[in-house]
Structure formats: structure tokens, C-alpha cells
Image (cartoon, helix red, strand yellow):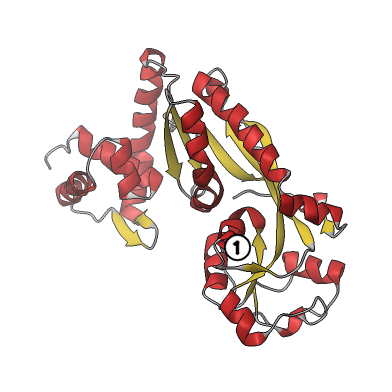
Amino acid sequence: MIRPPLHALQGFVAAARMGNLSRAAESLHLTVSALSHQIRGLEERLGQRLFVRVARGVELTADGQSLFERVSPHFDAIEQALQPYRARRDDVLTITLMPSFASSWLVPRLPRFLAAHPQIEINLQSTVNKIDFERQTDVDAGLRYGPGDWPGLQAVHLLDDWVAPTVSPELLARLGRPTLETLGEFPLLGAPGGRWSDWFAHFGGTPPKRFVATFDDSETLHRAAVEGLGIALGRLTLTRPMVDAGRLVTLFEERLQAEYAHYLVFPERSARHRGLQAFREWLLQEARDYAASAECVQARASGKVVPAKPSRRRGTR
């Protein structure tokens, strides 16, 4: 067998870690076509299928996983060996975050940061996958939704989140507006237990015996509500742009505090990054402005906000 070229193995490792050819190609400064060609060539040399396509990108086959486990530690060792010789640029900042939070909260505000700091180049990596900052040393920091405690990372609290029933105007016009007492008679999106149980326990009404549909991520849940599938218990940081655009309606003033909160996280190596320091201060001010917005103030003033239970603040997304 002819020895595979090193650059093909590097492309394979990048695609395996990110689970997405577009992001992997970008990190290697390649086109997607060039990276795909490298991987196909590697598969032909090895006589094995290394990836399969899935809805959100690519996944390793059993053979691909075996190769990744054998090869990736060597690339990690090379990366660590070169780290002391890599120049640190304070005017380039790479941030990882969930796609839903990027599109609904950060990106609409980002022009203000760039206007205030035109010398800083900011790169956003939107992904649902967790980032290993020890391995992916090109990533400076992340925005995470979770309990605020990630081993090996510094976490700066940005803002809490709130949940409330949201519905499309079309569904509201067709079925009418529910009250707190009759909400359980309407089509609800979600599952028994969890926050819906908390909602009915705090604000009254009878939960339904069955829900219309369940979803494993917030973005799909909110999209289903926009399409009129049912009423979602939506997170306000994610649904507010849709409410402002008239695509969703928040049914009540009542609010439940979400289980987790939003944080800026970063490894120790990024603590002295001047671009990150500027971004952190800007983020904190944006978070304060958001928390003081009319919607949150109105909800607190009404006395209809229920804090989350501390015992439930586990896990991360």
C-alpha cells in the first residue's frame, strides 16, 4: 500500500473532530471540494469507507473511528510541540457557540462590537458539538449554555434565560387564545415532565395527557412553533427575534427561569488575549442591557417570574 500523504490525514482528522466538512475545510484554509477530494483519495488508498453523511454533516464509520483513534494523538503531539513557536495575535478572535444563540442573540448585536473595535477580526464557529480547548488551540473562547462549571475553563456569567409559552399568530387565530387554566387543552410541543410540569405546577391548569411532538434541541422546537405545529415553552433569548418579527406570540406575562444560564468560557491560555478582554467587556454590557430590557423588567415587576430550581442545574448544551 502506498503511504497516504500527511495533508490527507490532517484533513481527515479535522473533519472527524468537527463533524462538518465546511468547517473543517475553513480551518485548513481549503475549499470543501479540495478537502472532499483528499478524503476520497485517502479512502481509496486504504480501501475503507471513513465517513457517512448525516443531517448535520458527517460521522465516522467504525473503520474511520479506528483510524482516528490511532492517528489523532500524533497530530495533537505535533500541535503541542509547535505551540510555543506560534505567534499570538490579539487582533484575531475565534469564538465557538451554538448556532441558535449565534443567530438569535449574538449576531444581531455584533455590528456594535465591530464598530467599537474595527481592528479586531472575529471568527465565529457555530456548532452543536463541544469544543476541546486543549486540542483545538485555534479557538480562543466559547459561549455556552449550562450550569457555569466546566473543568479547566474560566466561566463568566452573562445572563439568565426565561421560558414562556409561545405560539404562531396563525395557530392563535385558528384556535383562539388560551388562558392559564385552559392551556393544557391546546396542542403543546414538548414532553411530560421537565419545565412544562413546573409551569403547570406554578401557574395552574391541567397538563395534557399527551404532547403533539417532542424535540431534542431548542432551535427545532421553536421552528415547529413558527410553523404552527403547536405551543412551545420557548426560551426568550431564542424566541425574542421571532416575536419581534411577528412570527411568534408570547401568550402570557408569566415566566419561568430556565434551568441554565449563558456564560463566556475560555481556557487559561486565553486570559491575556486583548481581543478577548475587549469582547468580554462588551458582552457583559450587552447582557446587562438585555437583562434590563422592557420585557424582562415587566415580567419581574409583575411578580410572575418563577426562578429555576437550583437542584436541576446540571449538564450543558
Of residue 222 and residue 87, the one placed in the foreground of this image is 222
Location of residue 88 with respect to 66 vertically, above or below: above
**Residue type (three-letter) at the residue carrying disc 1:** Val
For the image, the number of numbered tags is 1
Residue at image coords 59%, 43%: 144
Q: Is residue 147 above or below residue 90?
A: below
- Whether residue 290 appears in this view of the structure is yes
Q: Position of residue 153 (x, y in %)?
A: 61, 31
Q: Mark 1 = which residue? A: 243
Q: Residue furthest top?
A: 85
Quadrant location of the N terminus in the rendered image: top left
> Quick one: label 1, few (<14), some, or many (20+) residues within 10 Å?
some
* Occupied quadrant, residue 156: top right
Q: Residue furthest left?
A: 2
Residue depicted at x 51% and y 32%? 113
Determine which quarter of the picture holds residue 143: top right
Residue at position x 39%, y 45% from top?
18
- Whether residue 23 sits left or right of residue 256 in the image: it is left
Task: Give the residue at x 62% y 82%.
Answer: 173
In the displayed structure, does residue 200 sit left or right of residue 110? right
Residue 308 appears in view: no
| Picture quadrant of residue 49 | bottom left
Q: Position of residue 15 (x, y in %)?
A: 33, 45
- In this rendered view, identify the residue nearer to me: 302 or 262: 302
Q: Position of residue 234 (x, y in %)?
A: 65, 63
Q: Is residue 91 left or right of residue 149?
A: left
Which secondary structure, mark 1?
A: helix
Image x and y of residue 165, in percent = 70, 68
